[in-house]
Image: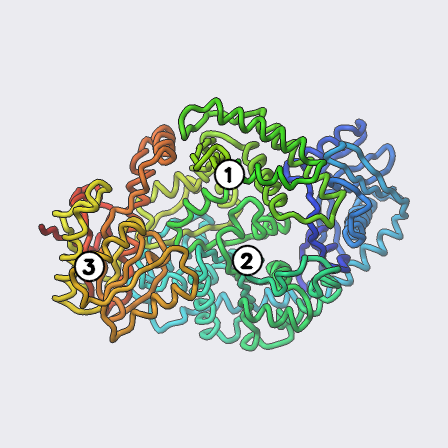
Amino acid sequence: MKRYTIAVRALCEFTAKTGDLDLRFTPSPTAQEGIAGHATVTARRGSSYQRELALAGDYGALHVRGRADGYDSAANRLEEIKTYRGDLARMPDNQRQLHWAQAKVYGHLLCATQALEQITLALVYFDVGSQKETMLQHEHSAAELKRYFEQQCELFLQWAAQELAHRTARDAQLEQLAFPYAGFRPGQRELAAAMYTASKRGVCLLAQAPTGIGKSVGSLFPMLKAAAQQQTDKVFFLAAKTPGRQLALDAVHVIRRSAPLLPLRTLELVARDSACVHPELACHGDSCPLARGFYDRLPAARQAALDTCLPAQQQRLLDRQTLQDIALAHQVCPYYLGSELARWCDVIVGDYNYYFDQSAMLYGLTVMNDWKVSVLVDEAHNMVSRARKMYSADMSHSSLRLLRKIAPEALKKPLERVQRQWNQLVREQEDDYQAYSELPEKWLGALQTAASAISDYQNEHPTYIEPLLQEFYFNALQFTRLAESFGPHALFDIEKRAGRSSAHSDSILCIRNIVPAPYLAPRFQLSHSSALFSATLSPWNYFHDLLGMPDNTAWVDVESPFVAEQLRVKVAAHISTRYQHRQQSLLPIAQLMAQQYAAQRGNYLAFFSSFDYMEKAAQTLAELYPDIPQWSQTRRMDEAARADFLARYTPESCGIGFAVLGGAFGEGVDLPGARLIGAFVATLGLPQVNPVNEQIRQRMDSLFGAGYDYTYTYPGMQKVVQAAGRVIRTQTDRGTVYLIDDRFDRAELRALLPAWWQVESFG
């Protein structure tokens, strides 16, 4: 049996965690508070105190390692430091047991390293609110701790042997893995080669690859092929939306079908709200039956999910439905079963946030377990906007006013202080919108005080549940966390919104991230290789700069398998869709649509810059040409309505569907052949010129010297190309795209269109 390395924390979580899953709202310290709390405790110790003590030891094939928080050699006391808020007595027993388990394992490792015969183990609980320590300590002999360590290792050894056998079989099959089809599609081989080379070199990759070449298989296959050689532990396939996750799962299915002996554990992660079976129940053992005894039933559920005793070809792909079926069969929570299985699966499919946001689960597990991971980011043109949202925070004055009316008496004073400071900020601001170079310290201090008060109150009243209070608390935490890292990558702004009266007026305070690079760069650096791919990643420096890609990031622009004869691209240079010209544009746009429809009946998509513009254009077409079938996207369309919209596109149907550029139908829609033969794009897709975007433009200009392009041109043209890309999906497709605006005639915009397009102007 080969050596299996495991962290102390991971070992103890596997062997010593029992009882209920308990996620009652008990505010815990932030990561910064936790770090500061550890520093405070260790700073109080004497000169004989050793901090962050690296320890390791072996038992059979197991190599156990970790860092103990501190050891006082003068007192012969090993300390495990935990930060908390509120009443320590309310800490669940199973959590305390886990802390003791970690302390005992570290105690054994230290005794073995320094030949100690006995030692004092201490749990030091530090209240970040009161700054007080509570120390619980016990004397242990080295022999006693050795027995405990060996017991924990014995509990894990069978699983470790199983994991090593799985890894050996997996890597042996990956070494022999062949491409799952008889041949590569045009362009697919070039993409796969770039992916494989990036993994082999251990660098990141930006890959622009046209729609329709099979990017999911073309990216996953080479990363898996390289995994055995590079000793990669995991491949994370991250998508922006649900259809992207399904494409990834389909790619895994194709690869596994072609390699029936490959034991490839694949897991789909979904949002907690989507996975929850009992949304009406609280997430703890006293309320939800799937939380009660969760850790006692987890081992059997984990074993069943991974099908470890079955041949590779019979092992299940753990998509959302399969995972839920297994969880319910074992009466455990599907969402947290998925979180546990992420530790043991080879390919994990999920949303961007699982690796890139502030509390990203996969990133945290990668750090804790020292995994070697490859990260695939599908439809990566979405990453800039998605990452900006991850690292932004806003708060509404109207929400605060409402909260103050219903808040418990103990919280009224700190909330009132936030209100006073907020009112002062709004009074001092003359304009409706203003950005500031510095954060308002007094207001921020009041917000931090209020958040601490809410935290203390929740700890003292654990059964008190008020959604508005919890929402304010979490927003406050997000705001204060981002305040700690505020810099040129972000804006702080205040927007005043007028109401029918002063009582209905509102104001919004926002920390607005505009350059996610400082937050994402460590995520790219941690991965063995990260590959971002999309049909629209031009220009590459825009994504490189804003996302914080390493300097040695590779770039590939995969040649399109499509030819100009497949797609007629026409620029309606006689029409302006600028805001001031929209009313005049409605008639010529309707005439253009009707002419094309008369020349070639079939299905079309028409994209506009806003719902208002779209609705007026649809109305104009209906009035002038009532015989042309049409249907429209609606505001706040649910999943069923979106499906109905797309169901109108059949090989036999004809008509024009109206949609908003950048919305649900502008990307990720696959309508091959006669289901879609053309598109009208009546906008450049440029973000609206408003005070916020003008502030972003100024900051982009100061940071990168390309303010207008980074703020308006590039994001807009990416949407245009994505929308037009709905028309040609396969090498047999034929279609027509109209770019409606005279500005599409400009050379600098033409340069951002796909190279294989042959664009002609008319009008």
Q: Compute the Cα span from label 3 to label 1.
A: 41 Å
In the rendered image, residue 122, in percent from the top left (x then y), is placed at 83, 42
Residue density around tag 2, few if under 14, some if 14–19, many if 20 or more, within 10 Å? few
> Residue visible at 23% across and 54% down?
617
| Numbered disc 3: secondary structure | helix
Foreground tag (3 vs 1):
3
* Kind of residue at disc 3: Leu
| Numbered disc 1: secondary structure | strand
Lateral position of residue 643 relative to residue 304, left or right: left
Foreground tag (2 vs 1):
1
Q: Which residue in the structure is indicated by mark 1?
A: 394
Q: Which mark is residue 271?
A: 2
- Evaluate if marks 3 and 1 touch, with contact meaning CB atoms under 8 Å apart: no
Q: Compute the Cα span from label 2 to label 1.
A: 22 Å
**Who comes first in sequence, dot 3 or dot 2?**
2
Lateral position of residue 485 relative to residue 216, left or right: right
Q: Is residue 32 visible?
A: yes
Q: Compute the Cα span from label 3 to label 2.
A: 41 Å
> Residue visible at 68% across and 33% down?
36
> Residue visible at 45% across and 70% down?
255
Seen as rendered, the residue at the extreme top is 428
**Who comes first in sequence, dot 2 or dot 1?**
2
Q: Which residue in the structure is indicated by mark 3?
A: 621
- Is 328 above or below relative to 390? below
Instruction: Count how many numbered circles sit on residues in the image.
Output: 3
Lateral position of residue 57 relative to residue 393, left or right: right
